[in-house]
Amino acid sequence: MGQALQAGQRAVALFEDLDDQYSLGEALDGLADSLLAAGRPGSEVRAGREASAAVYRRAGAEAEAARALAKPTGNGA
């Protein structure tokens, strides 16, 4: 297999991994929104926001990580 093809395959695999990580960040942020809407303790909502931010960061999405952390967490319990 040629070097260019191998490099292309690695690039596609990396992109797919980053896309998966970004999607997971979105899902965790959505879960935190649902926890907030359900009136769950703020500590649970905050944990969801922090998990979302960590995954976003692994995907290189710093702005989304900051946005997730800036969202409300509820009653602070």
Image (spheres, rainbow, N blue to C red):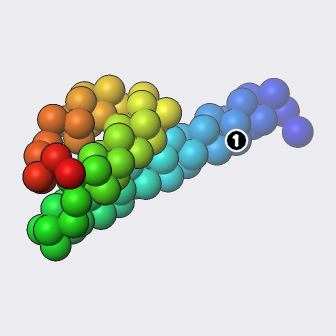
| Position of 27 relative to 4 (above/below) | below
Residue 38 percent location from the top left of the image = 16, 73
Residue 12 percent location from the top left of the image = 60, 43
Is residue 27 visible in this depiction of the protein? yes
| Position of 36 relative to 8 (above/below) | below
Q: Is residue 52 left or right of residue 76?
A: right
The quarter in which the N terminus is drawn is: top right
Front position in the image: 10 or 21: 21
Front position in the image: 31 or 40: 40
As drawn, the residue found furthest toward the bottom would be: 38
User: What residue sits 23% from the left and 36% below the top?
Assistant: 69
Q: Which residue is mark 1?
A: 9
User: What residue sits 75% from the left and 36% below the top?
Assistant: 5
Q: Is residue 13 left or right of residue 1?
A: left
Query: Quick one: label 1, few (<14), some, or many (20+) residues within 10 Å?
Result: few
User: What residue sits 16% from the left and 47% below the top?
Assistant: 76
Residue 8 percent location from the top left of the image = 67, 36
Q: Amino acid at mark 1?
A: Gln
Front position in the image: 28 or 9: 28
Quarter of the image for residue 70 reads: top left
